[in-house]
Image (cartoon, rainbow, N blue to C red):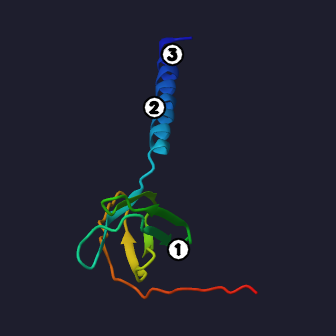
């Protein structure tokens, strides 16, 4: 093998190695977003154990979370798209926010204020 052939072979090998490394690095990067915030009642007090549901309007994918003692929640690993957020807690009216446009690598804060709802009682009589 002469010097030019060896140089071409080495150059080709370096190009292939660079392409493999680049593709591997690009494949390992998934750009996702998250939605987080705080749920409070009408007086501003935190609402613990509220159920938060986020639904992707395009795919129908659903992600859920529950608020902690300070009313805080976070839903990570969401893909870009349009979402609907729903917050529920017994004793409160259901809160829904539609048309949330989420872009890649975005983390919007969606604070929620729940209003006291109607309390329903159900009595079952078995005879």
Residue at mark 2 to residue at mark 1: CA–CA distance: 37 Å
Q: Which residue is drawn at 52% across and 18% down?
A: 5
Q: Which of marks 2 and 3 is in front?
A: 2
Q: In this view, does 34 lie to the left or right of 111?
A: right
Total marks shown come to 3
In which quarter of the view is residue 116 placed? Answer: bottom left
Residue 30 drawn at (x, y percent):
45, 50
In which quarter of the view is residue 52 placed? Answer: bottom left
Pick the front one: 99 or 69: 69
Residue at mark 3 to residue at mark 1: CA–CA distance: 53 Å
Q: Is residue 115 above or below residue 106?
A: below
Q: In this view, does 122 lie above or below 20?
A: below
Q: Which of marks 2 and 1 is in front?
A: 1
Q: Residue at x 50, y 75 (%)?
A: 57
Mark 2 and 3 residues: CB-CB less than 8 Å, in contact?
no
Q: Nearer the viewer, mark 3 or mark 1?
A: 1
Residue 45 drawn at (x, y percent):
26, 70
Number of other residues with Cα within 10 Å of mark 3, as a class: few under 14, some 14 to 19, many 20 or more? few
Q: Label 1 belongs to which residue? A: 58
Residue at mark 2 to residue at mark 3: CA–CA distance: 18 Å
Q: In this view, does 86 lie to the left or right of 124?
A: left
Q: Label 3 belongs to which residue? A: 6
Which residue lies most toward the front here?
127
Dot placed on the residue nearer the N-terminal end, 3 or 1? 3
Q: Which mark is residue 18?
A: 2
In which quarter of the view is residue 109 placed? Answer: bottom left
Pick the front one: 56 or 125: 125
Circle 3: element type:
helix
Circle 2: element type:
helix
Number of other residues with Cα within 10 Å of mark 2, as a class: few under 14, some 14 to 19, many 20 or more? few
């Amino acid at each position: 093998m002469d010097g030019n052939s060896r140089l071409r072979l080495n150059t080709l090998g370096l190009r292939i190695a660079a392409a493999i490394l680049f593709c591997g690095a690009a494949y390992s990067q998934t750009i996702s977003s998250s939605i987080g915030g705080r749920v409070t009642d009408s007086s501003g007090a935190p609402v613990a154990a509220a159920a938060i549901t986020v639904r992707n309007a395009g795919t129908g994918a659903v992600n859920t979370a529950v608020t902690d003692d300070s009313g805080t929640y976070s839903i990570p690993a969401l893909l870009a798209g349009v979402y609907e957020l729903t917050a529920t807690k017994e004793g409160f009216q259901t809160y829904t926010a539609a048309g949330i446009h989420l872009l890649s690598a975005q983390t919007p804060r969606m604070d929620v204020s729940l209003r006291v709802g109607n309390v329903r009682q159900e009595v079952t009589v078995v005879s």
